[in-house]
């Protein structure tokens, strides 16, 4: 696997100007309470370029006459390893992870400063600001400490994300394989929850069932805190409490995805707690599904990113008008964007190592980005009627419906990776009835 990360580092350095140095900070382990720590999760940019999955690590990449990869990591410590697990150590950083040289984190600054000699551009990947107070001092160290008649070096500081995040948008075959595995696990999890859903069940039970099911398919964790929201709870877009008992007549919205080898799935389904759609639930659900399917049908290389959102909004606005939930002509509704009262949010995002994966949605001229084969993203239209929307018929109030699928752009069109999670009204009622 070290060859994969070497390839990515080479690709990154090829995009940088000569005499560049990259600092990439890995994450540090966080304390949960007293001497109990949270499970460690590495920074995705760091992991993407190094594959090194231990806390407190730092990496340097140098583009010069001879490129270098230097890794700073915890040394071997038998006593600590007995309690908290094995470490690669300095030797392992070189032998197993492909570093040209390796040091401990305590040696970082003393190692870095001489390497900055002759460096024109310093690229920094440090999302949590671990070194934010030191960067300017490092960049100016040479000119502040050399003799007055020595040529001064002026080093600019740039965010690594400006280059790296563009690289991460189009997925490799191996990355797509991992997303597929995350989606397959999540498909099983959603089906299990759908069949267990009934009045009287608590949201936390269904959340736990999802976690249990994806674990059987190789997922160590969820890709984000699961949203299991009954009734009006679904009108809070990132509801995470998952603590309420489900009632007959409510809709349940579950937005949940597993993480497989650091790659995410992100799938949402909405369905009646009792397994049978009411007339009003069916009308809104079918409207959201129509919007989703019409947007998916537009996916192909060359399509613009925002065309998917525009399609969803057009379909849902027309449907809400037909149901009498929006007034005025469709031209007025679209011009005033009155539909946003019920549609609330955008309808998709990149998907990969981050559930809201990195990368620009616009090109360098500010135009919406066009789709390319290998891109993976979600499409997720939704309609929400909070219980305090008193001007809306009571039959709709306290209901949020969102449907989200994970889409891969192919050479000729698209593949809906999450198509096997029941999504039509008939499929859902059959699954819940089973």
Image: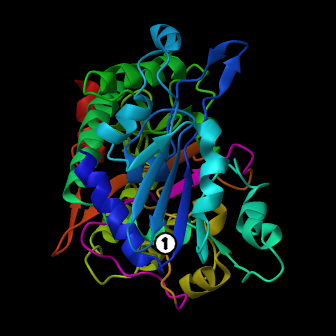
Q: Going 46% across and 42% down the picture, which residue do you hit? A: 102
Magenta stretch holds residue 379: yes
Tell me the quarter of the image containing the C terminus.
top left
Residue at the bottom extreme of this rendering: 365
Majority secondary structure of the magenta segment? Answer: loop
**In the image: residue 3, left or right of residue 338:** left
Percent across and percent down for residue 243 are 61, 21
Tell me the quarter of the image containing the N terminus.
top left
Q: Going 37% across and 50% down the picture, which residue do you hit? A: 100
Identify the magenta region.
Answer: 365-389
The relative height of residue 323 versus residue 45 in the rendered view (above or below) is below
Q: Quadrant of residue 408?
A: bottom left
Crowdedness near tag 1: few (<14), some (14–19) or many (≥20) residues, C-alpha within 10 Å: some
Between 196 and 55, the one lying in front of the other is: 55
Between 350 and 105, the one lying in front of the other is: 105
Percent across and percent down for residue 331 are 57, 87
Residue at the left extreme of this rendering: 412
At numbered mark 1, what does the secondary structure look like: helix, strand or loop? helix
Tell me if I can see residue 108 in this picture. yes
**In the image: residue 48, left or right of residue 163:** left
Q: Mark 1 points at which residue?
A: 163
The relative height of residue 179 versus residue 36 in the rendered view (above or below) is below
Percent across and percent down for residue 268 are 42, 45
Between 139 and 221, the one lying in front of the other is: 139
**In the image: residue 157, left or right of residue 216:** right
Magenta stretch holds residue 189: no
Q: In which quarter of the image is residue 217?
A: top left
Percent across and percent down for residue 162 are 54, 72
Question: Looking at the image, how many numbered discs can be counted on the residues?
Answer: 1
């Amino acid at each position: 696997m070290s060859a994969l990360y070497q390839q990515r580092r080479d690709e990154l350095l090829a995009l940088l100007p000569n005499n560049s140095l990259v600092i990439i900070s890995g994450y540090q382990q966080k304390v949960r309470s007293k001497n109990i720590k949270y499970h460690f999760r590495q920074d995705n940019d760091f992991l993407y370029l190094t594959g090194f999955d231990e806390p407190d690590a730092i990496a340097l990449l140098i583009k010069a006459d001879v490129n270098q990869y230097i890794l700073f990591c915890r040394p071997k410590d038998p006593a600590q390893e007995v309690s908290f697990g094995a470490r690669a150590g300095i030797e392992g950083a070189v032998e197993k992870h492909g570093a040209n040289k390796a040091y401990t984190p305590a040696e970082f600054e003393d190692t870095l400063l001489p390497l900055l000699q002759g460096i024109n551009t310093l690229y920094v990947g440090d999302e949590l600001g671990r070194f934010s107070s030191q960067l300017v001092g490092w960049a100016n160290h040479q000119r502040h400490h050399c003799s007055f008649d020595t040529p001064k070096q002026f080093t600019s500081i740039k965010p690594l994300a400006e280059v790296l995040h563009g690289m991460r948008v189009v997925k490799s075959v191996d990355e797509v394989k991992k997303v597929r595995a995350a989606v397959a696990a999540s498909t099983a999890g959603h089906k299990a929850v759908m069949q267990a859903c009934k009045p009287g069940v608590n949201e936390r039970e269904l959340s736990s069932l999802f976690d249990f099911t994806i674990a059987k398919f190789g997922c160590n964790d969820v890709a984000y805190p699961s949203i299991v929201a009954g009734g009006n709870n679904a009108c809070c877009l990132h509801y995470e409490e998952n603590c309420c008992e489900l009632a007959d007549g409510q809709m349940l919205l579950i937005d949940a995805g597993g993480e497989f080898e650091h790659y995410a799935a992100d799938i949402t389904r909405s369905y009646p707690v009792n397994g049978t759609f009411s007339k009003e639930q069916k009308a809104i659900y079918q409207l959201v599904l129509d919007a989703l399917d019409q947007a998916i049908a537009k996916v192909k290389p060359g399509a613009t990113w925002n065309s998917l959102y525009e399609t969803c909004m057009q379909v849902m606005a027309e449907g809400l008008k037909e149901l009498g939930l929006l007034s005025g002509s469709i031209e007025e509704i679209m011009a005033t964007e009155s539909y946003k009262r019920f549609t609330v949010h955008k309808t998709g995002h990149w998907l990969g190592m981050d559930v809201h994966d990195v990368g620009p949605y616009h090109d360098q001229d500010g135009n919406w980005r066009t789709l390319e084969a290998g891109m993976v993203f979600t499409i997720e239209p939704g309609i929400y009627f909070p219980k305090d929307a008193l001007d809306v018929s009571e039959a709709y109030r306290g209901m949020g419906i969102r449907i989200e699928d994970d889409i891969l752009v192919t050479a000729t069109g698209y593949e809906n990776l999450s198509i096997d999670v029941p999504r039509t009204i008939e499929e859902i009622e059959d699954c819940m009835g089973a």
